[in-house]
Image (cartoon, rainbow, N blue to C red):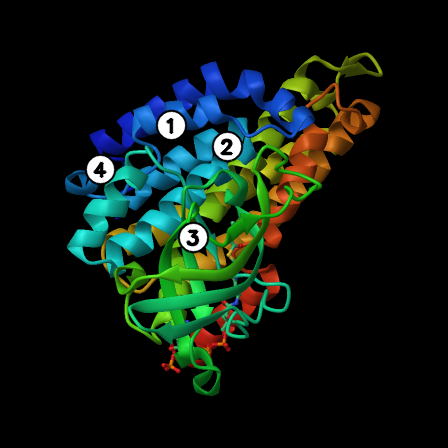
Amino acid sequence: MQFELTDDQQMVQKTARDFATAEVLPKAAEIDREHRHPKELVARMAELGFLGIAIDDKWGGAGMDHVAYVLAMEEISRACASTGVIMSVNNSLVCDPISRFATDAQKARWLTPLASGKLLGCFALSEPEAGSDAAAQRTTAERVDGGWVINGVKNWITNGPVADVCVLFTMNDRAAGHRGITAFILPMDAKGVRTGPPDDKLGIRGSKSCQIFLDDVRLSDDHLLGEVGGGFKVAMSTLDGGRIGIAAQAVGIARAALEDALAYAQQRKTFGKAIIGHQAVAFKLADMATEVDAARLLTLRAAWLKDHKRPYGKEAAMAKLYASDVANKAAREAIQIFGGNGYVTEFPVERHFRDAKITEIYEGTSEIQRLVIAGALAKGA
Ligand code: CAA
């Protein structure tokens, strides 16, 4: 067993840490307060190769692996969870399925600009009536001469208001159930595509999400992603990888809570000494540090399995389930350590608390992760 990172992985980690510390962290509170899409940070991430980390350089990516992706995601999310999820969606939910299912012509047209950050992507699976039950798609794709006509509504689409391209899921044969689901690559400026107002969220307020309305949108066959009726497998296999990215985001949030609480506990004094000298505080920090490490190891293992072409769906679900729980617990404990100061916006830990919650919901709730893990156990995996 080998716990050392490669030179390339260490280089990506250091680049991400330097960028996150110098450029992302100083803006995180303002991005949250203003509900602002951090356009300039997205542009910098494109320059640094962070929008297509594990995509081959032949297609505009950085040509690194998923371990490097996880390391970078943790660093960026430690500074700003909103910036982290913008990056995660583009890498995991957009570039990854296009790299696996698109034709070379589609890759040249869409993957190269997406992986290099010239375009930004979103992933539209959820609908008002299809969240956890992703197979219950109501958006229709009707075959017409020369292509498809698409009608429907998508919900909670991260990056939706700012995306150029969308990996879109539709139902083209309701009687076939999940085998009637078909994926498309949708240019967001296609006629008939309209975005709703940005969702007003509890946390990750710099990450813009919205509804997408599709009214008689016409797409030619060269927008199909994978096979007609193969869309559910595109979605499920994509989410397996996405869950690794969100686990890394959760590790970043948990580490932010730990580091901020540790620094505070070393300078805040009560009863004549720094509060870290009180076991009630010290033991919380010890538990937080242990759990952050365990969550990180689960996340790195899932990424390593993906890099080594081994099955990783169960391990990705375990990593997301555990890391999202750790992030929420760490943020709650950080507020407790800060006391009254933890409850006001002057200090960062209330932001970590609000940002942590979404990691238990998107890309499959914690309950869905348990279903995936239990399903794998039942199959002997
Ligand atoms: N990879 C490939 N294929 C898979 C798969 C996987 N991981 N999981 C299931 N499948 C296939 C199965 O093999 C099966 O295929 P066949 O019938 O051809 O054999 C088919 O899919 C159906 O499988 P299930 O019967 O298990 O499907 P289900 O309808 O019971 O649903 C579920 C399973 C796990 C609950 C799934 O619906 C699910 O993951 N739901 C959660 C959806 C989700 O995570 N949404 C997040 C939205 S995106 C988002 O949040 C992005 C963002 O904004 C940041």
Q: Which amino acid is tagged 2? A: Thr
> Which residue is more in the foreground, 182 or 280?
182
Residue 276 in view here: yes
Spot occupied by residue 196 in the image (x, y as percentages of width and height): 62, 47
Q: Which amino acid is tagged 3? A: Gly
In the picture shown, does residue 30 fall above or below 121?
Answer: above
Mark number displayed over residue 83: 2
Mark number displayed over residue 25: none
Q: Which of disc 4 and disc 3 is earlier in sequence?
A: 4
Left or right, 2 with respect to 262, comes to left
Q: Element at badge 4?
A: loop
Spot occupied by residue 373 in the image (x, y as percentages of width and height): 48, 69
In the picture shown, does residue 191 fall above or below 348?
Answer: below
Inter-mark Cα distance, 2 to 3: 15 Å
Is label 3 or label 4 in front? 4
Q: Which of disc 4 and disc 2 is earlier in sequence?
A: 4
Q: Residue at x 61, y 55 (%)?
A: 361
Q: Which of disc 2 and disc 1 is earlier in sequence?
A: 1
Inter-mark Cα distance, 1 to 2: 9 Å
Task: Farthest residue to the front: give it.
Answer: 145
The residue under label 1 is 45
Q: Quadrant of residue 269?
A: top right
Spot occupied by residue 277 in the image (x, y as percentages of width and height): 71, 21
Mark number displayed over residue 242: 3
Q: Quadrant of residue 287?
A: top right
In the picture shown, does residue 326 fall above or below 71?
Answer: below
